Structure formats: structure tokens, C-alpha cells
Image (spheres, helix red, strand yellow):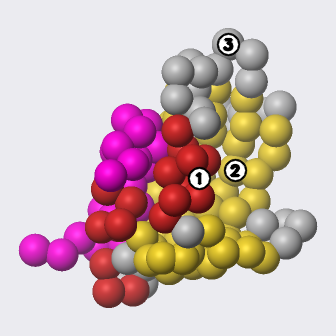
Amino acid sequence: MAMTPVEHARFYYENVWMQHKVGLIPELCANPVMRHDFARDYTITHEEQRERILAHEGKGFVFRIVNIHGDHEYATIIWEITSPTYNMAGIEVMHIPNGKIVEVWNGKREGILWPK
């Protein structure tokens, strides 16, 4: 059974980002994925995604989903990352038609966490 976009996004974060299971990237993401950050739009290949995720391995980052919501093609994730020396909070919108992440909009801010 196919996952909903919310289930897909949660699975991606919990397995690829939190557990560094980068072998799942081809199954979960298009190649390339279009990314929209505040400063620029760019594409990221599977290999670039693997490198980006593995660069965080062993640094003590804890990724937490604060809230997640979606519809039949999109998932919106409010998240935060903590470590002994680093905090970041953000909101990400993923376009996930047909079971693959194809496009991501990401707004993040370093040095803060969401208020409790």
C-alpha cells in the first residue's frame, strides 16, 4: 500500500535524516529534487543528498518533528534540530506526487528553537 505524503515525509525524516539510512533515498526521492530556499532555487541529486545527510552523522544532532500536516500531494513539516552546540528551526513543504519527493520549499533559521 502506498504511503500518504504525510506518512512519506515522516518516514523520510525518521529513517533518512534521523538514522542516516541514505540507501532509501532513491526509493523516496526523485533524481534530482528541486529545492527552494530563501536565497535560491537549485536541484539536488541522490548523491548530493547522501553527502549532505552523512555530513551530519556523528555530530550529535537530534532532529524533531514539531508538527506535520498534508493533503493528497503535499506534506508540511515544522521541525527543529538540536545538538550540544547548535540549534535550528524550520518549516518545509514537500511535493510528493506518485510516491516520490520531487520538490521542497525550506525556510529555516539558525540559533533558535520553536517556543514550547
| Numbered disc 3: secondary structure | loop
- Residue 33 percent across, percent down from the top left: 56, 75
Tag 3: Cα neighbours inside 10 Å, few (<14), some, or many (≥20)?
few
Q: CA distance from mark 2 to mark 3?
A: 18 Å
Q: Is residue 10 left or right of residue 90?
A: left
For disc 1, the marked residue is 78
Residue at 73% of width from left, 29% of height from top?
87
- For the residues labelled 1 and 3, say whether their Cβ atoms are less than 8 Å apart: no
Q: Do tag 1 and tag 2 residues touch (Cβ < 8 Å)?
A: yes
Provide residue 105's location: percent of width, then percent of height: 67, 71
Name the residue type under label 1. Answer: Ile
Give SS at disc 1.
strand
Residue under the image location 85 percent in, 66 percent down = 38
Q: Tell which circle, 1 or 3, labels the residue nearer the N-terminal end.
A: 1
Residue 71 visible somewhere in the drawing: no
Q: Gap in Å between the C-alphas at discs 1 and 2? A: 6 Å
Is 80 left, or right, of 77 in this rendering? right
Q: Which mark is residue 90?
A: 2
Give the magenta range.
1-23
- Cα–Cα gap, marks 1 and 3: 21 Å
Residue 18 figure quarter: top left
* In front of the other: 99 or 25: 25
Is 98 drawn above or below residue 23 in the view shown?
Answer: below
Q: Which mark is residue 84?
A: 3
